[in-house]
Image (cartoon, grey):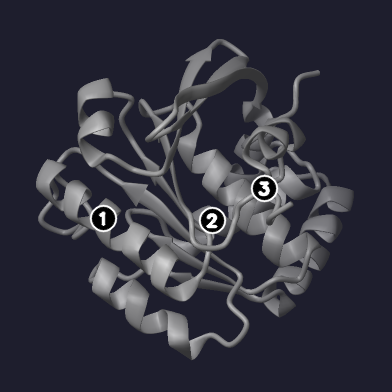
Amino acid sequence: MGLSTGIRALDDVLGGLQPGRFYLVAAAPGAGSSLIATAAARTSALEQHQPVLYAASGLTRADIAARIVAAHLPVDYRRLRAGRLTPTEQDDTAALHHHLAQAPLYIDDGTDLTTDAIAESVPDLPGLALVVVDRLQTTEDPRLPLSGPAQITDAAQALAHLARTHELPVLAAVDTDDPHLIAALSLDITVTLARDADQIHATVTERDLGPQATLTLHADLAHARITDPT
């Protein structure tokens, strides 16, 4: 079993996140791809104490920390961002922030983030166990290098190469479920998400073998996380 995604049902299908493999989590905006990326990073770094490089495109360190805290404790994400936690929740949050600061989670939220920059960071992090890219964006934005259809194609291929050459699991989120774009990427493993209220339908597809499994997960959006079925 490879590294856990933090979601047991998904781990059972994938066999965990295996070294040398690139995993693309594809979903329309709001359907949960970014939450799976955060869950994988949180589980590996905070629970399993494995070094993780979190490359955040369009997200800030504060965004990532808030999602991790809300999911891990858990506390209500909206009240957390609004600063309306109870005194007990505030104490728990402060303690977790301290713990998070000590965890081997390396966040790069620079506006100059590219796949070359990600690859150059890998040798500088001894014992690196996982690379997470959150996220590739289909709408081109001149301020975000990992955006636009052409850049997504190049980035996906570069990240797949990074996984193979460094024998690392690499997981990236992309903000589309367009089957034509996903098929054009021709990647090893794709997890496509479709959200229906508080349910997430996840289809796992392998490039050479086609769809392997479809499972239903729970969208616990109050705590900014996706969990196993209730």
Closest to the observer, 130 or 39: 130
Mark 1 burial class by Cα count in 10 Å: few <14, some 14-19, many 20+: some
Location of mark 2 (residue): 64
First-in-chain label (3 vs 2): 3
Q: Check if mark 3's residue and mark 1's residue have beta carbons within 8 Å.
A: no
Q: Residue at x 53, y 47 (%)?
A: 37
Amino acid type of the residue tagged 1 in the rendering: Gln
Location of mark 1 (residue): 157
Q: Residue at x 28, y 32 (%)?
A: 182
**Nearer mark to the viewer, of 1 and 2:** 1
First-in-chain label (1 vs 2): 2
Q: Is residue 39 above or below residue 111?
A: above
Q: Is residue 60 above or below residue 51?
A: above
Q: Secondary structure at mark 3?
A: loop
Residue 214's disc is none
Q: Secondary structure at mark 1?
A: helix
Q: Secondary structure at mark 2?
A: helix
Q: Position of residue 35 (x, y in %)?
A: 55, 40
Does residue 24 appear left or right of residue 176 in this picture?
Answer: right
Query: What residue occupies the far front of the structure in this picture?
Result: 208
Location of mark 3 (residue): 16
Q: Check if mark 1's residue and mark 2's residue have beta carbons within 8 Å.
A: no
Mark 2 burial class by Cα count in 10 Å: few <14, some 14-19, many 20+: many
The reply to whether residue 113 is visible in this rendering is: no
